[in-house]
């Protein structure tokens, strides 16, 4: 009898243990499901935010590209005057010779951290590649184009008295609007005829050559960034369809 009771007790105990284990597994399963659901929601928010930032970046980069084309046109005109000795009475927007870009980067240090929330390795790798390209483009601009403009071109323009102070002080609004300093357009802050005369000097020609090389380096990197931006947006758009 005692042996029979002991056998039933062990069966009962084993059954209880099995039920407890099943309960724990179910609880863990539910917990994992909740965690996965939360992670998916976080990932979706991250991807949407990244996509919005990329779209804003794209608008900014299109502006940079349009500015480069205008600057390149002015450089070619000054080259034709100085090196080909062509007679050109008017050039396009002299102020563009000293144009600098107003960077407003949306990609910051936490961008790479957010990429860790993304499961799709292709999207994650594209984000890392994109941020590296942004950094490279930034370095080329700051240490190449802007440095040359600040250290060589602007001092030369002041030394040759090519600025028109009156045009500057008569501006009603001297603030940036978006990425562009629209108020300066057509205001002749740079003496057009003086710049044309300077284009024929050896000193200015050397500065123009160095500046054009740096702008071309920047534009090459910019085109790469634009291409990567487009590809990354397409990847993210496809990934978001899975949610």
Image (cartoon, helix red, strand yellow):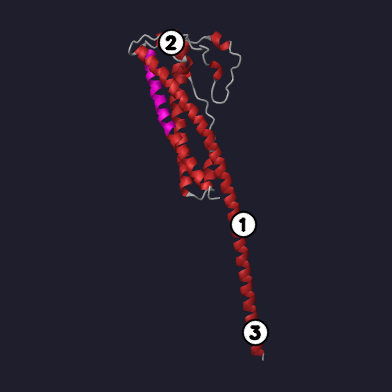
Identify the residue under disc 1.
34
Q: CA distance from mark 1 to mark 2?
A: 69 Å
The picture places residue 209, in percent across and down from the top left corner, at: 37, 19
Identify the residue under disc 3.
8
Residue 151 seen in the figure: yes
In which quadrant of the rendered view does residue 86 lie? top left
Q: CA distance from mark 1 to mark 3?
A: 39 Å
Does the stretch in magenta take in 186? no
Q: Nearer the viewer, residue 194 or 72?
A: 72
Q: Residue furthest left?
A: 84
The picture places residue 235, in percent across and down from the top left corner, at: 48, 44
Residue drawn at x 51%, y 13% is 186
Residue drawn at x 61%, y 14% is 172
Please tell me whether mark 1 or mark 3 is closer to you in this view. Answer: 1
Residues at marks 3 and 2 touching, judged by CB atoms closer than 8 Å:
no
Q: Nearer the viewer, residue 180 or 104?
A: 180
Secondary element type, mark 1: helix
- Rate crowding at label 3 as few (under 14), some (14 to 19) or many (20 or more) other CA atoms within 10 Å: few
Q: Which residues are magenta?
A: 202-223
Secondary element type, mark 3: helix
The picture places residue 113, in percent across and down from the top left corner, at: 54, 44
Residue 90, numbered circle: 2
Q: Nearer the viewer, residue 50 or 169?
A: 50
């Amino acid at each position: 009898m005692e042996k029979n009771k002991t056998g039933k007790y062990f069966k009962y105990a084993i059954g209880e243990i099995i039920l407890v284990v099943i309960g724990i597994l179910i609880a863990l399963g539910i917990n994992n499901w909740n965690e996965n659901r939360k992670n998916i929601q976080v990932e979706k928010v991250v991807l949407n935010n990244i996509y919005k930032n990329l779209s804003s970046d794209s608008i900014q980069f299109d502006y940079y590209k349009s500015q480069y084309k205008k600057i390149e046109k002015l450089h070619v005109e000054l080259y034709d005057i100085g090196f080909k000795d062509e007679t050109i009475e008017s050039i396009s927007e002299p102020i563009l010779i000293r144009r600098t870009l107003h960077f407003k980067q949306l990609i910051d240090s936490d961008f790479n951290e957010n990429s860790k929330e993304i499961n799709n390795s292709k999207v994650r790798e594209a984000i890392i590649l994109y941020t590296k390209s942004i950094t490279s483009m930034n370095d080329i601009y700051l240490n190449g184009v802007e440095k040359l403009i600040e250290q060589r071109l602007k001092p030369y323009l002041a030394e040759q008295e090519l600025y028109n102070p009156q045009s500057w002080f008569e501006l009603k609004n001297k603030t940036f609007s978006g990425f562009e300093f629209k108020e300066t357009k057509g205001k002749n802050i740079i003496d057009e005829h003086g710049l044309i005369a300077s284009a024929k000097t050896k000193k200015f020609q050397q500065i123009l050559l160095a500046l054009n090389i740096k702008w071309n380096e920047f534009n090459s990197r910019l085109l790469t960034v634009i291409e990567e931006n487009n590809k990354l947006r397409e990847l993210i758009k496809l990934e978001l369809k899975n949610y």
